[in-house]
Protein backbone atom coordinates (compact mmCIF):
# COMPACT_ATOMS: atom_id res chain seq x y z
CA UNK A 1 0.00 0.00 0.00
CA UNK A 2 2.78 2.41 0.89
CA UNK A 3 4.53 1.59 -2.37
CA UNK A 4 1.38 2.49 -4.37
CA UNK A 5 0.95 5.73 -2.43
CA UNK A 6 4.59 6.64 -3.04
CA UNK A 7 4.29 5.92 -6.79
CA UNK A 8 1.09 8.01 -6.97
CA UNK A 9 2.88 10.91 -5.26
CA UNK A 10 5.82 10.67 -7.68
CA UNK A 11 3.47 10.61 -10.67
CA UNK A 12 1.59 13.62 -9.30
CA UNK A 13 4.85 15.54 -8.85
CA UNK A 14 5.96 14.70 -12.39
CA UNK A 15 2.66 15.91 -13.87
CA UNK A 16 2.76 19.12 -11.80
CA UNK A 17 6.38 19.70 -12.76
CA UNK A 18 5.62 19.30 -16.50
CA UNK A 19 2.60 21.61 -16.23
CA UNK A 20 4.66 24.24 -14.40
CA UNK A 21 7.39 24.12 -17.07
CA UNK A 22 4.80 24.60 -19.85
CA UNK A 23 3.19 27.49 -17.95
CA UNK A 24 6.56 29.28 -17.87
CA UNK A 25 6.97 29.07 -21.63
CA UNK A 26 6.45 32.51 -23.20
CA UNK A 27 3.62 33.07 -25.65
CA UNK A 28 4.26 35.55 -28.46
CA UNK A 29 1.98 37.15 -31.01
CA UNK A 30 3.39 37.72 -34.47
CA UNK A 31 1.43 40.27 -36.48
CA UNK A 32 2.00 39.94 -40.23
CA UNK A 33 0.57 41.50 -43.36
CA UNK A 34 -1.51 38.30 -43.83
CA UNK A 35 -2.77 37.99 -40.25
CA UNK A 36 -1.72 37.05 -36.74
CA UNK A 37 0.08 33.95 -35.51
CA UNK A 38 0.34 33.04 -31.82
CA UNK A 39 3.28 30.87 -30.78
CA UNK A 40 4.47 29.12 -27.64
CA UNK A 41 8.24 29.24 -27.15
CA UNK A 42 9.81 26.22 -25.47
CA UNK A 43 12.08 27.96 -22.96
CA UNK A 44 12.20 24.70 -21.01
CA UNK A 45 13.66 22.72 -23.95
CA UNK A 46 15.47 25.37 -26.02
CA UNK A 47 16.54 28.14 -23.62
CA UNK A 48 19.31 29.56 -25.82
CA UNK A 49 17.12 29.78 -28.93
CA UNK A 50 14.19 31.27 -27.00
CA UNK A 51 16.39 33.86 -25.29
CA UNK A 52 17.85 34.80 -28.69
CA UNK A 53 14.40 35.05 -30.36
CA UNK A 54 13.02 37.14 -27.51
CA UNK A 55 16.02 39.48 -27.64
CA UNK A 56 15.22 40.22 -31.28
CA UNK A 57 11.47 40.46 -30.62
CA UNK A 58 11.79 42.73 -27.58
CA UNK A 59 14.18 45.09 -29.37
CA UNK A 60 11.74 45.52 -32.27
CA UNK A 61 14.21 43.98 -34.72
CA UNK A 62 11.57 41.85 -36.47
CA UNK A 63 9.44 44.88 -37.42
CA UNK A 64 9.43 45.25 -41.21
CA UNK A 65 11.30 42.03 -41.88
CA UNK A 66 9.73 39.66 -44.39
CA UNK A 67 9.05 36.00 -44.97
CA UNK A 68 11.39 35.84 -47.95
CA UNK A 69 11.26 32.08 -48.58
CA UNK A 70 7.99 30.14 -48.79
CA UNK A 71 8.08 26.57 -50.05
CA UNK A 72 4.82 24.58 -50.26
CA UNK A 73 5.02 21.24 -48.47
CA UNK A 74 8.10 22.39 -46.57
CA UNK A 75 8.30 25.70 -44.64
CA UNK A 76 8.15 29.51 -44.52
CA UNK A 77 11.33 31.39 -43.54
CA UNK A 78 11.79 34.96 -42.40
CA UNK A 79 13.07 37.33 -39.77
CA UNK A 80 16.28 38.61 -41.28
CA UNK A 81 15.62 40.39 -44.56
CA UNK A 82 13.55 43.40 -45.54
CA UNK A 83 10.81 43.22 -48.18
CA UNK A 84 13.49 44.45 -50.62
CA UNK A 85 15.55 41.32 -49.78
CA UNK A 86 18.20 43.34 -47.99
CA UNK A 87 19.71 42.08 -44.72
CA UNK A 88 18.31 44.01 -41.77
CA UNK A 89 21.24 45.41 -39.79
CA UNK A 90 21.62 44.51 -36.15
CA UNK A 91 22.16 40.74 -36.04
CA UNK A 92 23.39 39.45 -32.70
CA UNK A 93 26.18 36.89 -32.41
CA UNK A 94 25.35 33.39 -33.70
CA UNK A 95 24.01 30.97 -31.10
CA UNK A 96 24.62 27.35 -30.12
CA UNK A 97 22.47 24.92 -32.08
CA UNK A 98 20.03 23.17 -29.72
CA UNK A 99 18.84 20.52 -32.20
CA UNK A 100 19.82 17.84 -29.66
CA UNK A 101 16.84 18.85 -27.44
CA UNK A 102 14.62 16.03 -28.74
CA UNK A 103 12.04 18.33 -30.36
CA UNK A 104 11.04 17.39 -33.91
CA UNK A 105 10.56 19.55 -37.00
CA UNK A 106 6.87 18.70 -37.26
CA UNK A 107 4.11 20.74 -38.87
CA UNK A 108 3.54 23.98 -36.97
CA UNK A 109 6.88 24.04 -35.14
CA UNK A 110 9.31 26.97 -35.20
CA UNK A 111 12.99 26.31 -35.78
CA UNK A 112 16.12 28.41 -36.11
CA UNK A 113 17.37 28.92 -39.67
CA UNK A 114 21.11 28.66 -40.15
CA UNK A 115 23.83 28.32 -42.76
CA UNK A 116 25.80 25.12 -43.35
CA UNK A 117 27.70 25.90 -40.15
CA UNK A 118 26.04 24.10 -37.21
CA UNK A 119 26.21 27.01 -34.73
CA UNK A 120 25.36 29.89 -37.10
CA UNK A 121 21.73 30.83 -36.32
CA UNK A 122 21.05 34.51 -35.68
CA UNK A 123 17.66 36.19 -36.33
CA UNK A 124 16.11 34.06 -39.06
CA UNK A 125 13.60 31.35 -38.20
CA UNK A 126 11.18 29.14 -40.04
CA UNK A 127 7.81 27.53 -39.47
CA UNK A 128 7.42 23.97 -40.70
CA UNK A 129 4.28 23.41 -42.81
CA UNK A 130 4.90 19.65 -42.98
CA UNK A 131 6.61 17.02 -40.86
CA UNK A 132 10.23 17.53 -41.95
CA UNK A 133 11.98 14.57 -40.33
CA UNK A 134 15.11 15.12 -42.43
CA UNK A 135 15.71 18.38 -40.49
CA UNK A 136 15.83 16.57 -37.13
CA UNK A 137 19.04 15.85 -35.24
CA UNK A 138 20.54 12.50 -36.30
CA UNK A 139 24.17 12.75 -35.27
CA UNK A 140 26.94 15.27 -34.55
CA UNK A 141 28.21 15.57 -38.12
CA UNK A 142 27.60 18.82 -40.00
CA UNK A 143 25.00 17.17 -42.25
CA UNK A 144 23.29 15.27 -39.45
CA UNK A 145 23.16 17.87 -36.70
CA UNK A 146 19.74 19.23 -37.66
CA UNK A 147 17.78 22.42 -37.04
CA UNK A 148 16.78 23.48 -33.52
CA UNK A 149 13.05 23.55 -32.83
CA UNK A 150 12.21 26.15 -30.19
CA UNK A 151 8.44 26.68 -30.38
CA UNK A 152 5.14 25.89 -32.03
CA UNK A 153 2.19 27.71 -33.53
CA UNK A 154 -0.78 27.57 -31.16
CA UNK A 155 -3.14 29.79 -33.20
CA UNK A 156 -2.97 31.05 -36.76
CA UNK A 157 -1.65 28.07 -38.70
CA UNK A 158 -4.21 29.09 -41.35
CA UNK A 159 -2.19 32.31 -41.78
CA UNK A 160 1.02 30.28 -42.21
CA UNK A 161 -0.78 28.15 -44.81
CA UNK A 162 -1.75 31.38 -46.66
CA UNK A 163 1.92 32.39 -46.62
CA UNK A 164 3.10 29.16 -48.16
CA UNK A 165 0.33 29.28 -50.78
CA UNK A 166 1.21 32.83 -51.88
CA UNK A 167 2.25 33.24 -55.54
CA UNK A 168 6.02 33.30 -55.68
CA UNK A 169 8.91 33.60 -58.08
CA UNK A 170 12.66 33.40 -58.32
CA UNK A 171 14.23 36.84 -57.88
CA UNK A 172 17.81 35.90 -58.74
CA UNK A 173 20.32 33.10 -58.18
CA UNK A 174 20.23 33.66 -54.41
CA UNK A 175 16.54 34.24 -53.73
CA UNK A 176 14.11 31.59 -54.86
CA UNK A 177 10.54 30.92 -53.67
CA UNK A 178 10.05 34.62 -52.84
CA UNK A 179 6.42 35.77 -52.43
CA UNK A 180 5.46 38.13 -55.29
CA UNK A 181 3.74 40.38 -52.74
CA UNK A 182 5.96 40.75 -49.67
CA UNK A 183 4.71 39.07 -46.49
CA UNK A 184 5.88 41.48 -43.80
CA UNK A 185 6.24 41.00 -40.06
CA UNK A 186 4.70 44.06 -38.41
CA UNK A 187 5.68 43.02 -34.89
CA UNK A 188 6.41 40.13 -32.56
CA UNK A 189 5.37 40.76 -28.97
CA UNK A 190 5.30 38.67 -25.81
CA UNK A 191 1.68 38.32 -24.67
CA UNK A 192 2.22 35.92 -21.76
Image (tube, grey):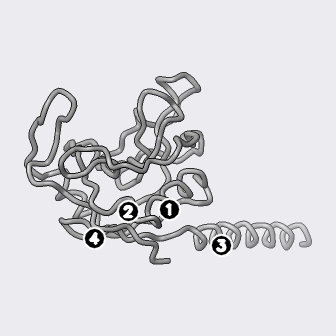
Q: Earlier in the sequence, mark 1 or mark 4?
A: 4
In this image, 12 relative to 97: left or right? right
**Mark 1 vs mark 2, CA separation in Å:** 16 Å
Q: Residue at x 50, y 43 (%)?
A: 148
Residue assigned mark 3: 20
Q: Secondary structure at mark 1?
A: helix
Element type where label 3 sits in the image: helix
Taking the spot 40% from the left edge, 42% from the top edge, the residue there is: 113
The answer to whether 173 appears left or right of 147 in the picture is left
Along the horizontal axis of the image, is 147 left or right of 22? Answer: left
Q: Could you tell which of marks 3 and 2 lies nearer the N-terminus?
A: 3
Q: CA distance from mark 4 to mark 2?
A: 11 Å
Image marks 1 and 3: residues in contact by CB distance under 8 Å = no
Q: Are marks 1 and 2 in contact (CB under 8 Å)?
A: no
Closer to us: mark 1 or mark 3?
Answer: 1
The dot on residue 54 is 1
x and y percent of residue 59 in the render? 45, 64
Looking at the image, do the residues carrying marks 4 and 2 touch, with CB atoms under 8 Å apart? no
- Whether 78 is drawn above or below 17: the answer is above
- Among numbered discs 1 and 2, the one appearing first in the sequence: 1
Image mark for residue 6: none
Instruction: Determine which residue is flagged by label 4.
Output: 36
Amino acid sequence: MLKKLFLAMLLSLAVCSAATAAEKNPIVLMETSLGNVKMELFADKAPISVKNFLAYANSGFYKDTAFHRVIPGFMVQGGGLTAQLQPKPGDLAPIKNEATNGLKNDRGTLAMARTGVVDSATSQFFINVANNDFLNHRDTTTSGYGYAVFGKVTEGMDVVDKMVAAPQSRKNSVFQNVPNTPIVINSIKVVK
